[in-house]
Image (cartoon, rainbow, N blue to C red):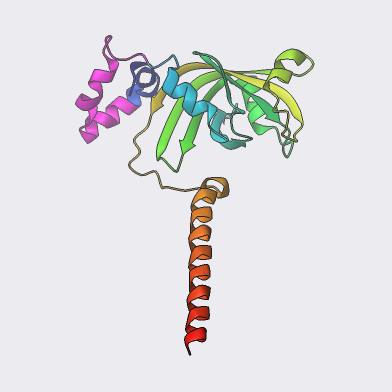
Amino acid sequence: MARAYAKLSFTPAVRKVQKQQGSAKAYDKFLLPDANGGDRLGSAEIDFISARDGFYQATVSESFRPYVQFRGGPEGFLQVLDDKTIAYADFRGNRQYISSGNLTINDKVSLILMDYPNQRRLKIIGRAIQIDKTEDPKLVSSLEMPDYRAVVERAVLIQIEAFDWNCPKYIPQRLTLQEFEPHISSLQQQIAQLIEENTALKTKLESIT
């Protein structure tokens, strides 16, 4: 864990529970001035973010209730603009606008990006800015995915305050159909080869008998 993430996440209430549970001393080092910053994306984070086809985003309403939504799109739709800023085109969905509405009164967001096949997870804390197509059509256009059929209503820019690579211990390994296809293709080739060999053996056996 990096210092920036610890400073934002380890509130007095959290520290109290850590002390009660005996883990406070183990996490003290992440709050020291010389601890790794963790608020500017490096090459590992940029590559990871650019390869995602979805992420979980949490916002908070004016009644202080959290709302978590899955944001999906083609691989790379969540783009890195610089080492402190990521952005995505907000595609039209069911038009409830819960996340969008929450962001108009509280710009704080928390993202979880998953890589299930490799059991990796990146958590991001930041502040989001919504920019309508009419406000900055050039920016919104730059975030659109040309071959993806979806209506883009706005751009969402997230200023990163902290990020953290999470423990992979309890992350289940899952594959999408696209990720599983190479494995299926290999099995299909093996099956086809076995069928061909079996047919040849049958033909040979029939010729002998």
- The total of numbered circles placed on residues is 0
Image quadrant occupied by the N terminus = top left
Considering the whole magenta stretch, tell me its main secondary structure.
helix
Q: Quadrant of residue 117?
A: top left
Image x and y of residue 59, in percent: 56, 29
Decide if residue 65 is in sight here. no
Image x and y of residue 165, in percent: 38, 28
> Vertically, is 207 above or below 70?
below
- Going 38% across and 17% down the picture, which residue do you hit? 38
**Which segment is the magenta one?**
14-37
Image x and y of residue 110, in percent: 50, 27
Q: Is residue 16 magenta?
A: yes
Decide if residue 41 is in sight here. yes
Image x and y of residue 175, in percent: 49, 48
Is 59 positioned to the left or the right of 93 in the image?
left
Is 208 positioned to the left or the right of 99 in the image?
left
- Going 41% across and 36% down the picture, which residue do you hit? 120
- Going 47% across and 36% down the picture, which residue do you hit? 114
Q: Is residue 4 magenta?
A: no
